[in-house]
Image (spheres, helix red, strand yellow):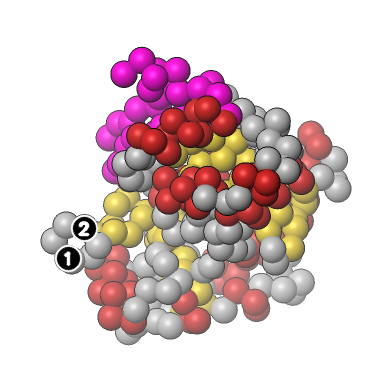
Amino acid sequence: GYYAKVFGSHANCLSYPDGERTWVQLESRANQIARLLVEHQVVPNSFVTVALPNGILFHEVCFAIWKVGATPHIVSHRLPDGELSAILQLLKPAVLIGAESRGVEGCPALQIETANSTYSDAPLQPKVAKHWKAMSSGGSTGRPKIIVDAKSSEMDISQSLFDLPSKSCILNPGPLYHNVPFSFSHSALARGNRVVGMGKFDAETVLKLIQEHAVTWVMMVPTMMHRIWRLPEGIRSKYDLSSINIVGHVASPMPVWLKEKWVEWLGPGRVYELYGGTEGTGGTWMSGYEWLEH
């Protein structure tokens, strides 16, 4: 409710292909879903497995989980039954949300659609989870690995990691079941940013959304940047990207020639590289200027 007071009741915080939400609507819907979770024995510091595609509901569910002091455990909604079952047996979450409501023995599947207007959307007493997220990984052994973040769900919004803005607009072109899209999208919302999300990546749509929403910050992987660069120059040049302050890249090595092209296109002060791991043991953030020096 805080940002609804700051920006007004009609200010949007989420824009996706499946719709938009204002800060008021996000708060209301998260409170309703939170009450549904409590009704299904979700207690503080329990895990709730989220297997949803990119969209409005994904964020509503995660904020509801934090509201009850629990931890969202994120998996791909496309995960094969065998892998999903192995992960759920390892973690033993309170409930599973999404993945077409597939479940395993001992892990009930919850239909979020039942959290309708019969549940109150009144504010809830704040609770803090010991762990703010848990991400899944196949690991190097081929066995499922769950990376539980050591940080709590209480966030210091005065801290700006990796030049993430405040009260601005960011674009997320990646799947929310990956650590970087998940972390930055929700951290951005916590800092009062509007998040523009994509259901699936499309090179020209990225440029269109940057222009349409005056996006100031976006994080991509080199493959995405390669696809954008391969667009005909007439398409790339017809969009206004002047709002962008940061284009970051992460997750895999960036070809030198491609980095040079992006630095030439946007300037070295707007192209940044992030290196780090899901475990959160450390990371580096390097500008195009620093990259050119090396």
Q: Position of residue 190 (x, y in %)?
A: 60, 39
Q: Is residue 82 left or right of residue 173?
A: left
- State which quarter of the image contains the C terminus: top left
Q: Position of residue 123 (x, y in %)?
A: 70, 51
Residue 14, above or below 200: above
Q: Is residue 139 left or right of residue 207?
A: left
Q: Position of residue 140 (x, y in %)?
A: 16, 57
Residue that appears at 33% across and 31% down? 283
Q: Position of residue 184 (x, y in %)?
A: 51, 42
Residue 113 position by quadrant: bottom right
**Within-10-Å neighbours for mark 2: few <14, some 14–19, many 20+:** few
Give the Cα distance between marks 1 and 2. 6 Å
Toward the viewer: 16 or 57? 16
Residue type at the position of mark 1: Gly
Question: Which residues lie in the magenta part?
Answer: 266-294
Say whether residue 249 is magenta: no
Residue that appears at 48% across and 81% down? 101
Q: How many marks?
A: 2
Residue 266, above or below 86: above
| Outermost residue toward the left in this view | 141
Residue 139 image label: 2
Q: Is residue 121 visible?
A: no
Residue that appears at 50% across and 81% down? 100
Residue that appears at 39% across and 19% down? 292
Say whether residue 287 is magenta: yes
Residue placed under numbered mark 1 in the picture: 142
Toward the viewer: 256 or 270? 256
Q: Secondary structure at mark 1?
A: loop
- State which quarter of the image contains the N terminus: top right
Residue 262 image label: none
Residue 203, above or below 50: above
